[in-house]
Amino acid sequence: MHQRINKNKKIIFALIFLAIAVGIIYTSRHLITDYMLRGKPYAPFTEKSSYDDFSWYGARMNRVFNGDLFISDIAVFEYKDAPPFAPPLSTMLYSPMFFLGKTFINGLILIDFFYPFCFFIFFYVIGFLLTKQKWFSFFIAILSTLAAKMANFFFNFEFQNFAKYFFPFSHLETNLLNKRESVLPDYFILLLAIIFILLTINTRNTKRGYIYGVLMGIFAGLLIYTYPLYAIYMGGVWMVLFIYFLIVKDYAILKRFLCGGIICFLTIIPYFIIQYQRESIISGQELLERWGGEFERKINFHVYRYYIVYMALMILTYIFGRKNKKESIFVIGCLASIIIGLNIQLLTGYNLQSDHWLSRVAPIGLNITFFMWVYWLWNFLKKKGIIFKIFNIGLILFCVFSFTRSIHAQYLFSKNTYEMFTIEDSNFLNAIDWLNKNTEKDSVVLTPSLKRNLSIILLTHNRVYVPNAINTLAPEKEIIDRAFTLFRVLNVKPQHIGNLMDTEKNRVAVSEADSENMGAEYFFYSRYAPHELDTAIKNTPCTVPEKIQKDFINLYEATEATAKDLFKYRADYLFWGGAEKAIAKDFNPENKDWLKKEYQNDTTAIYKIFPNEI
């Protein structure tokens, strides 16, 4: 008894120690990058480092940092309290870290420490529930947190990349756990849902079984508020398990699943109410088009090779796991659910971000499959003497190399990219600082610069007059009306509008991460991209049809607006720097009675708008 307690203490100590180590690894890039910048301001989200973070994820996090727990529209004041158009729970999970961190950078460091720390512990629990092996579960946790794409490479026959995991300092692509928001922090809910599914099917105690079933239903339901693809994925796993227990007539577990299903249904009811309420502002169809929905109600044969691989894995899993029926059926469910997700359009009529099924969702099922295969092999080799010892040494070396490789990868990433993570324009930063300290939260800043609009919602507590299509509930017609009204008041030339829509200029801008000239993406995002089932998987460029481009330019030329027309929407400040002067060369804010200068530095001024003076 005493020995068992000491052994458990060692396991708990090792678990916490390794979880802390994983958390430190994931925060290290912030610290290394900040050190390498040598006094330059560290900016974790810039257009050069990641356009998605710069234009979307970073702005959502900034809204949380500025006190918005339940986020709807990121950019437009008029819709700040509207029903959310993106899953709200993801950003809510950031909130405690920003509250504790006090500053944005500190909050970000806490986020990148706390959630990988939790993921390591959750993966350990999942491993233990599947294998009942305390020490082997450390391998599972390390594999899942520090080598998350290893199984992808193995099952996709990319053995050159797979082999790199067995070297202590090999260079691999950035880890899956760095992906916001689909993984960080959404795995927090996903892994808890998996844990309670496993507890539900493994617990013999009836009372506890129902409790776990209820918790399974709650966390499975919450997935729709984080990353809907995970909700669909867990639904597929649940369905496979339900069918299995129905076939084997295990009615005790079926009752738990039914109980969990009812709770899950009740949990997701508010989600559909939100969808209905949002229709009064913008149609769901327009949002789906904007986000790149693929609208074909047929089987997606473009990824047939993955179906072959996953079906082969299911058959082999069934063969290898004959002695562990529940566990093998769970693994089969994790694989089958990927195929279900890739064809969810058969049920819904559309698939959204279908490439994420392979890049974000598939690694979950593939990792679980891989470590269960390794476990079954480990079990098989137990009686093989020296071979078993060599195999264990190999597992230990793999775990050690995972840490050395991950530390080295974070260092290399920071060393090679640190120059992307700074903003050197001190005048711009000083103006941003002034906005944060001297303006009302949610007050609206006007600028004709697309990059400045994105920067303002990323770096300040302010809203903007001209939103990016991905950041707002405003319908396309309103986005264009806002932009054209402001552009006309500032006397922006039609040539600039033409440049914003030019296909070749947009292609170059996207390749160079030049957000100032990505007009098509800014105003339409993916709405006019192809909407076939292979669009996302082939990474088809988002181009605006020539007719839409011409209509856009013609509409601007026909638009007439005066300063009074600005006040159809809230307008508080005009941001006036080098980018604005280059776009609106003929506009001089100094001779406008309705503009009063509130701030000035060497290159940038900020004017307060007084509508009564017009």
Image (cartoon, helix red, strand yellow):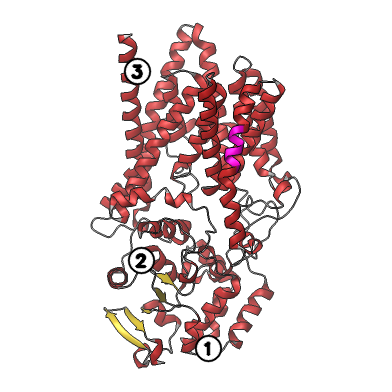
Q: Quadrant of the N terminus?
A: top left
Where does the image place residue 38, in percent across and percent down from the top left? 24, 55
Where does the image place residue 561, in percent across and percent down from the top left? 53, 88
Per the image, the residue denoted by label 2 is: 460
Q: Amino acid at mark 3?
A: Asn
Secondary structure under badge 2? loop
Labels 1 and 3 touching (C-beta < 8 A): no
Per the image, the residue denoted by label 3 is: 8
Q: Amino acid at mark 1?
A: Ala
Q: CA distance from mark 1 to mark 2?
A: 28 Å
Q: Is residue 385 visible?
A: yes
| Residue at image location 48% in from the left, 83% down from the top | 566
Where does the image place residue 521, in percent across and percent down from the top left? 55, 66
Q: Is residue 175 visible?
A: no
> Main structural element of the magenta stretch: helix, strand or loop?
helix
Q: CA distance from mark 1 to mark 3?
A: 73 Å
Res 289 quadrant in image: bottom right
